[in-house]
């Protein structure tokens, strides 16, 4: 039986999880694979911190060259995260004809296209299952299991930190800052949670899913991104009254060759399957022409769940290596010459229903002035809620409206007029409502 030798770069939480799975599940992996996966080297600058897993002598090293470019290492696992030095290490490994497994969505979103080219030119595999949805096998599903379908849309809850915060805000009426602090204390949110709460981490993952769905190069810049930090507890109360829940949604749709990609807080009907995904869990909802709708649910982060996806990739590549069948699956699941630039719909041209929360002084004619401006921009109102007020204009009161489907461009034009009115005390809060995912 031939050994396949593995080198790991980045011995943090996920790296320790991968080592644990390889060591503890050695028997089952061997039974499935039929060849030995040998963890030969682990490179990190810090090899003294206790990671809770016993590594045999001679494996840990601070010398990156013992992994990258070492002819004795067949597959490199990159778990450093971030752009550099991850990009340089992955590029060098591929150029040295080492296959690579990564969990690094930021790297793929920014440099994925060029790294795929390097992998192709060197005849090696570059797998990235753990980069989207943690342990959920969504990449393999889209590249392989759904290969006979035209995919029409992919929508997901792809960030556990945001989903935890939105779930707690909705359940407990707490405000954003308090729940974020709690999430940090529990270790869910990073010390610097910007990429999570501003939607950037979700957009990195959506950039990858969009390419897998619609055979276009990865293009992070085309994604419209909004985070969750402006959502107020009162928005959850109104969402409940309308029968909706608020989620940070990643949306990619292809309508007659026109692609929409956006990440923003979204109200979805409480009966929709995605509305039931709570706490730190992730889910991806795929519409495909033969299969119809399907949902993939699980742990989107964490040591062992992410390690599960990394080791699944290792086993796939090890099978390709032992059958001399490298690049069995193209990087994005389509033949490379069929990856063509996407035709993207600008955000101003998308259509949606909208939740609008106006902060208005309690004066007569407020409603008619707002409604008049909306009507003048072809925005039709589906329902209105006004609570409180009646004591004159001492304080602003929320007026909440749900619109019928409207064009984003028209909505923005209407709001820029409305927010200038003397009866409006603060910028209007907007949350898109999606009933037809
Ligand atoms: N920080 C991410 C999350 C996990 O909260 O889901 C890694 O992408």
Image: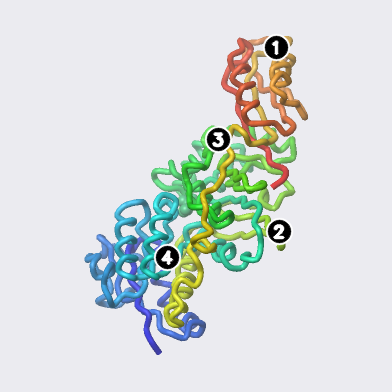
Mark before the other along the chain sequence, 3 or 2: 3
- Compute the Cα span from label 3 to label 2: 41 Å
Residue bearing mark 1: 391
Image quadrant holding the N terminus, namely: bottom left
Q: Residues within 10 Å of mark 2 (few under 14, many from 20)?
A: some
* Disc 1 and disc 3 in contact, CB within 8 angstroms: no
Q: Is residue 270 above or below residue 38?
A: above
* Disc 4 and disc 3 in contact, CB within 8 angstroms: no
Q: x%, y% of residue 58?
A: 25, 76
* SS label for mark 2: loop
- Compute the Cα span from label 1 to label 3: 27 Å
* SS label for mark 4: strand
Residue bearing mark 4: 126
Q: Give the mark toward the camera: 4 or 1.
A: 4
Q: x%, y% of residue 236?
A: 65, 36
Residue bearing mark 3: 175
Residue bearing mark 2: 289
Q: Would you say residue 116 is visible in this rendering? A: yes
């Amino acid at each position: 039986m031939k050994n396949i030798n593995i080198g790991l770069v980045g011995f943090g939480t996920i790296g320790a999880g991968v080592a644990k799975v390889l060591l503890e599940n050695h028997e089952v992996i061997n039974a499935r694979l039929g060849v030995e996966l040998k963890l030969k080297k682990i490179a990190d600058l810090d090899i003294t911190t206790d990671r809770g897993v016993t590594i045999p002598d001679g494996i840990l090293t601070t010398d990156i060259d013992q992994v990258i470019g070492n002819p004795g290492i067949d597959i490199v696992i990159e778990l450093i995260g971030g752009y550099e030095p991850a990009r340089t290490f992955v590029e060098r490994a591929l150029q040295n004809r080492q296959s690579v497994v990564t969990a690094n969505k930021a790297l793929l979103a920014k440099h994925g296209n060029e790294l795929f080219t390097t992998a192709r030119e060197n005849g090696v595999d570059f797998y990235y299952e753990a980069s989207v949805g943690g342990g959920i096998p969504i990449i393999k599903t889209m590249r392989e299991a759904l290969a006979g379908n035209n995919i029409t849309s992919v929508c997901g809850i792809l960030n556990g930190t945001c989903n935890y915060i939105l779930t707690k805000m909705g359940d407990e009426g707490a405000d954003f800052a308090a729940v974020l602090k709690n999430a940090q204390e529990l270790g869910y949110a990073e010390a610097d949670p910007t990429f999570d709460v501003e939607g950037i981490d979700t957009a990195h993952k959506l950039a990858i899913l969009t390419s897998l769905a619609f055979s276009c190069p990865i293009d992070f810049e085309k994604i419209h991104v909004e985070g969750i930090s402006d959502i107020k507890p009162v928005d959850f109360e109104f969402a409940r009254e309308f029968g909706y829940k608020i989620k940070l949604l990643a949306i990619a749709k292809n309508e007659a060759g026109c692609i929409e990609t956006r990440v923003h807080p979204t109200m979805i009907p409480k009966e929709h399957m995605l509305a039931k995904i709570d706490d730190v869990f992730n889910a991806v909802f795929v519409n495909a022409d033969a299969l119809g709708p399907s949902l993939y649910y699980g742990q989107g982060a964490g040591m062992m769940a992410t390690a599960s996806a990394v080791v699944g990739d290792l086993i796939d590549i090890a099978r390709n290596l032992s059958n001399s069948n490298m690049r069995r699956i193209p990087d994005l699941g389509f033949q490379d010459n069929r990856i063509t630039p996407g035709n993207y719909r600008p955000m101003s041209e998308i259509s949606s229903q909208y939740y609008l929360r106006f902060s208005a002084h309690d004066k007569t004619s407020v409603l008619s002035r707002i409604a008049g401006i909306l009507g003048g921009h072809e925005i039709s109102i589906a329902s209105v809620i006004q609570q409180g007020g009646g004591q004159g204009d001492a304080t602003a009161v929320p007026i909440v409206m749900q619109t019928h489907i409207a064009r984003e461009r028209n909505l923005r034009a209407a709001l820029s007029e409305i927010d200038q009115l003397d009866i409006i005390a603060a910028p209007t809060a907007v949350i898109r409502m999606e009933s037809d995912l």
